[in-house]
Amino acid sequence: MSLTLTVDGPRWRAHLEDVARTHPGLVPVAKGNGYGFTLGRLARKTQWLADREHDVTTLAVGTYDELPEVASRWRGDVLVLTPWRPFVEPVDPALARRVVHTVSRYDDLRALLAAEPEARLVLEHATSMRRHGMTGRELWDAGALLRKHPGARVEGVALHLPLQQGSHLGEVNRILTSTVAADAGLTTAWVSHLTDAELKSLSASWPDFTFRPRIGTSLWLGDRGALKVTATVLDVHPVERGDVFGYRGRTAPKSGHVLVVSGGTAHGIGLEAPTGDQSVKARAATLARGGLDAIGFVRSPYSIEGKQRLFAEPPHMQASMLFVPQGARVPEVGDQVDVRVRYTATTFDRIVVEG
Amino acid sequence: MPSVRPITPTEHRDHLASLPSASFLQTPGWAQVKSEWRSESLGWFDDSGKQRGAALVLYRKLPKLNRFLAYLPEGPVIDWDSDCLRDWLDPMVAHLKRQGAFAVRIGPPVVTRRWTAAQVKEGVADPDVKLLGQVPPEERSAAGARVVAQLHDLGWRHQAAEGGFAAGQPQYVFQVPLRHPDGTARTEDEVLKGMNQLWRRNIKKAAKEGVEVSAGTRDDLKAFHDLYVHTAERDHFTPRPLPYFEVMWDALNADAPDRLKLWLGRHQGDLVAATLAVRVGEHYWYSYGASSTEKREVRGSNAVQWAMIQDALASGCAVYDLRGITDTLDSDDSHVGLIQFKVGTGGEAVEYAGEWDLPINRALYKAFQIYLARR
């Protein structure tokens, strides 16, 4: 009766171990909807990696609100990726020693050290993303401040790189030079979105530095073949051309079947999220889908026997109606159909890890 | 913000004399050694008119054009600790532009990394290590990193010296510190103890064989030069003519007495090794060396090196500088023997910030780079 994520357990775990083995110092990222798996499950999986003696000491979450979800399922340190601000509520004292704050402004560093002199933190350096982070000069000032707070527990510099094509090496080299210039004894760099070749090259040219790669998508979702998403067929109705159906009283354009399947807006099904693909073709496809929506049926993420089917009407809260034209094989109630989803925007009813 | 104007050689000399040290390539005398280029002494002055910096600029003319590369080898001599290098460099660049420079090349005399002799030795022994940079340094200098970060921000471009020696001044050198970290002088005994066994044995052997090392005069340059030409033939490099060294002697020693010294090592009257040493303030450089092919067993080269180190110590120097090494630690590379010889002194490998270019006329600069690449 549900939208289900089925995981090929042995294959998925082998992939996780492979990533951990090839990325020493790995910082798994568990944020948002937990990449579809839920935060709790990712926290447990991170603990499993650590128990298997992989070099995993820290789990990264997106926000302070996500801390309780992971803290009881993972015994190590937790890095909060959203930069600390003075209005952030103090962390549960029981957790404080395990939490590593991200500090992205000089004023915040001063405020945090005043509020929690023992706080553990990383200093975020701005990148070409221009999102959060200090400039090189601000980092020097931060270094001067830290030299006056020898008790502060600074765990390194953090940088958040864009997903761009092309090399990040020049940018990272400049940021690391700024880090040395800050003269605060920072020799750990927390990085994201570097290729394996880039990480290797940086480790060679900065042999006295430790690199901590923060990895989310390519860790949890890196082996798509281990993951399968299915919906249950809940009802099947034959329709003739002109028959009226659904909330909106639409009419069937030709004869076929209307299927009711599990999965709706509550799961994130049918919600259009920007794909990130900015090619002309992708944008044209978006326009075409909009046009289709205006005059008739929209392509759904459900596919039956490898063929993507149209929504008969916009998805409901927990179920969707599909149209299957005459001539195609019609599944029966209780059958499973495949669904293609964006994992970071989908909530599953069930997650089944097989094996 | 300091202002920049040309200064006389006397002003230049007096300013350098007020500092602990500066590169000899930034002394007014060096302009005479490099007489094929137009040169100029520059001074930085604060609002009260006090001199704050100095530079020797060599203007290298572009073929067929009245435009120049303004080259400041191992300079300028300014306050590189400044967090606002723009204030120092901007007025200099404006001046050089008015002089017809299409680009400026500088070599900040700023250390960025250091490795101990033991670390270099381990790097050579490790088959996975091909470059000095792959060995974790003993020290990364924050001050050096600030200079590098600022030059990047100000639009200067690092001139990477890939594989062996590039055309400019070496970015990596080998130095023997002559002072303890607390600033007190090391004794001869301490320096000797820092050397590897081979060096110590060779120095002892030279003394036992009766090698006598003495400082020479200008008249002895001829004897040095003969041996140097002999060395050049043996080691396959192109020797400079005798007048080059005579000009160097006259020009450098006119700046300061004993700035350039000649050291001669003799065994039973035969000249077995000879070197030239340069000293500016507390910095002592081993500059040119020559050795005979005969009588290598009396270890004349080690004897003259030791005499120079002793002289540096006696002059109160802070650093004995063996000049350039390449950054290769690949035991298959021909340059590695040179590093191993220098490492035997027990000093440290030092990385400087390297040479940096600022294009003023981008089109000409680009053409110049293409010209260099094809040369």
Image (cartoon, coloured by chain):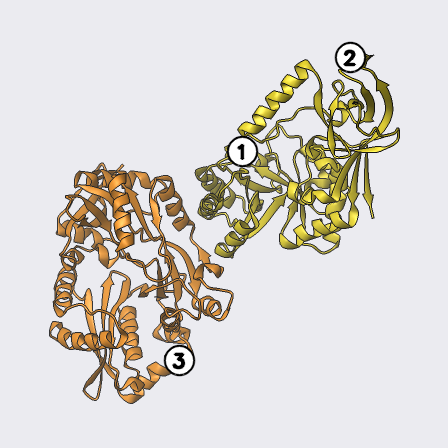
Density class for disc 3 (Cα within 10 Å; few <14, some 14-19, many ≥20) is few
The residue where tag 2 is placed is A251
Residue pictured at 13% horizontal, 52% vertical: B9
Contact check, label 1 and label 2, Cβ < 8 Å: no
Residue pictured at 39% horizontal, 72% vertical: B340
Q: Earlier in the sequence, mark 1 or mark 2?
A: 1
Q: CA distance from mark 3 to mark 2?
A: 97 Å
Left or right relative to B305: residue B68: left
Q: Is residue A204 above or below residue A328?
A: below
Counting from the top left corner in percent of width and height, residue B107 is at 30, 52
Mark 2 belongs to which subunit?
A
Q: Which chain is orange?
A: B
Q: Is residue A60 above or below residue B204?
A: above
Counting from the top left corner in percent of width and height, residue B293 is at 26, 83
The answer to whether tags 3 and 1 share a subunit is: no
Q: Mark 1 belongs to which amino acid?
A: His
Q: CA distance from mark 1 to mark 2?
A: 51 Å
- Please state which of residues B88 and A290 is positioned toward the viewer in this rendering: A290
Q: Which chain is yellow?
A: A
Helix, strand or loop at label 1? It is loop
The answer to whether tags 1 and 2 share a subunit is: yes
Q: CA distance from mark 3 to mark 1?
A: 56 Å
Q: Mark 2 belongs to which amino acid?
A: Thr
Residue pictured at 21% horizontal, 38% vertical: B48
Contact check, label 3 and label 1, Cβ < 8 Å: no
The residue where tag 3 is placed is B198
The residue where tag 1 is placed is A132
Residue at the farthest right position: A333
Density class for disc 1 (Cα within 10 Å; few <14, some 14-19, many ≥20) is some
Mark 1 belongs to which subunit?
A
